[in-house]
Amino acid sequence: MATLQVGDIAPKFEGTDQNGNFINLDSLIGNKVVLYFYPKDDTPGCTAEACDLRDNYDHLMAQGYKVIGVSPDDLKSHKKFAEKFDLPFPLLPDPDKHIIQSYGVWGPKKFLGKSYDGVLRTTFVIAEDGTIKEIFTKVDTKNHTKQILS
């Protein structure tokens, strides 16, 4: 699959979040969407990113953004993560990596000198018309909202 670029139509996605709500991209058309992909619930970088988005959630909503997180973790893990950190936005489980692969964010990584495949931390800002407005591949987990809004 070709790498997604700014201006491309965002791939459609759907899923059930940690609260049992069905979410799909079609229902979000007309809103700006922050679709962020992260490797794993309740790990340091992923927690910092989620908490930054949580702490700035009202400001993002006031600017017209909907926030959705996606990782390969399952529904039970997402529910526990969202409750532990009081996350006000949906987290979509993607254990089969359908959404992750359609956005091209699964690939080679290195950690402690070991190579493996995993989720490449990436955020897509999707415009009201469903096109990709911005892509962040170098996410500052502690200041991600500032990246999105600047």
Image: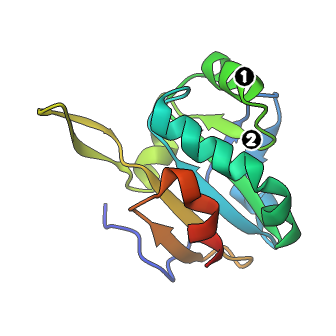
Q: Residue furthest left?
A: 113
Query: Residue at (49%, 42%) from the top-left corner?
Result: 38
Q: How many neighbours does mark 2 have within 10 angstroms: few (below 14), some (14-19), or many (20 or more)?
A: many
Res 126 visible:
no
Check the image and report above or below for 15 versus 125. Answer: above
Q: Residue at x 33, y 67 (%)?
A: 3
What residue does disc 1 label? 84
Q: Residue furthest bottom?
A: 7
Q: Nearer the viewer, mark 1 or mark 2?
A: 1
Q: Is residue 50 left or right of residue 66?
A: left
Residue at 88% in and 68% down: 62
Task: Provide the secondary structure element on which disc 1 rests.
Answer: helix
Closer to us: 39 or 47: 47
Residue 93 x %, y %: 60, 32
Percent coordinates x, y for residue 60 in the rendering = 78, 64
Q: Amino acid at mark 2?
A: Pro
Look at the image and tell me in which quarter the C terminus lies.
bottom right
* Closer-to-camera residue (81/5): 81
Helix, strand or loop under label 2:
loop
Classify mark 1: residues with Cα within 10 Å, few (<14), some (14-19) or many (20+): few
